[in-house]
Each structure stands twice: as C-alpha cells, then as structure tokens.
Image: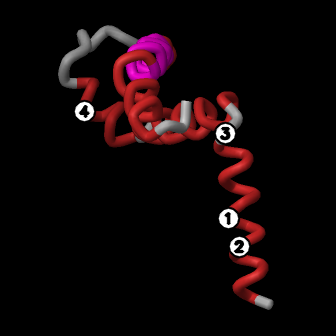
Amino acid sequence: MVSGFVKDSESWVADKWANRVVQLSVYAGVLFYVVANPSVFKYMERFLPSQISKINQLVVHSVLFAVLVYVGTRMLFDPVLSNMGLL
C-alpha cells in the first residue's frame, strides 16, 4: 500500500515538474527565499548609502530579484534542465 502511494506520488510530481510554469515557480520561490532573507538585507546595508530607507531597500531587492530570475533562468536553470532532458 505504501509503495503504491509513493510510486503514484512520484509519477504525479514528475508529471507536474514537466510543466514549465511549475519549474519556474519553484526556482523563483527558492530564489525569493534567499534574496528576501533578513540576513541578506542586513548584509546589503553595508553596500548601500546610509540615507536609503527600508522602502527603497525593498525596491533595490525587488529589482535584484527580477534580474536574478531572468539571468538565472537563461544562464543556469535552462541549460541545466536541457542537459537533463527535462526542457
């Protein structure tokens, strides 16, 4: 019974993973977790001028996230999935 459930779950996940939207959503979710982490905000404060408010920091991180999603998708995520035959 358990092995049947695991096998069904595995095929369900593999079927969903073939969907491009699911792939990019998982990638963006992991990247957001990293970029939006409070320790990353604290680290970045060292490189930004002191007069930048928290709201403007959020804008900087939003732009950084968008750039990383684009570049990471084109330069990292797509080539890796292509080599694995998943794209």
- How busy is the neighbourhood of tag 2: few (under 14 within 10 Å), some, or many (20 plus)? few
Q: Residue at image x 66%, y 52%?
A: 14
- Per the image, the residue denoted by label 3 is 18
From this view, report whether residue 20 is shown above or below residue 4: above
Q: Residue at image x 33%, y 35%?
A: 40
User: Closest to the observer: 38 or 50?
Assistant: 38
Residue 61 drawn in magenta: yes
User: Callout 4, which amino acid?
Assistant: Tyr
Q: Earlier in the sequence, mark 3 or mark 2?
A: 2
From this view, report whether residue 78 is shown above or below residue 70: below
Residue 64 drawn in magenta: yes
In terms of image quadrants, where is residue 11?
bottom right
Range covered by the magenta-colored residues: 60-73
Q: Residue at image x 59%, y 30%?
A: 24
User: Which of the two discs, 4 and 3, sits closer to the camera?
Assistant: 3
What is the spatial separation of the Cα atoms under label 4 and label 3, in whole angstroms? 36 Å
Of all residues, the one furthest to the left in this rendering is 46
- Per the image, the residue denoted by label 2 is 7
User: Callout 2, which amino acid?
Assistant: Lys
From this view, report whether residue 61 is shown above or below residue 28: above
- Per the image, the residue denoted by label 4 is 43
What is the spatial separation of the Cα atoms under label 2 and label 1, in whole angstroms? 5 Å
Q: Earlier in the sequence, mark 4 or mark 3?
A: 3
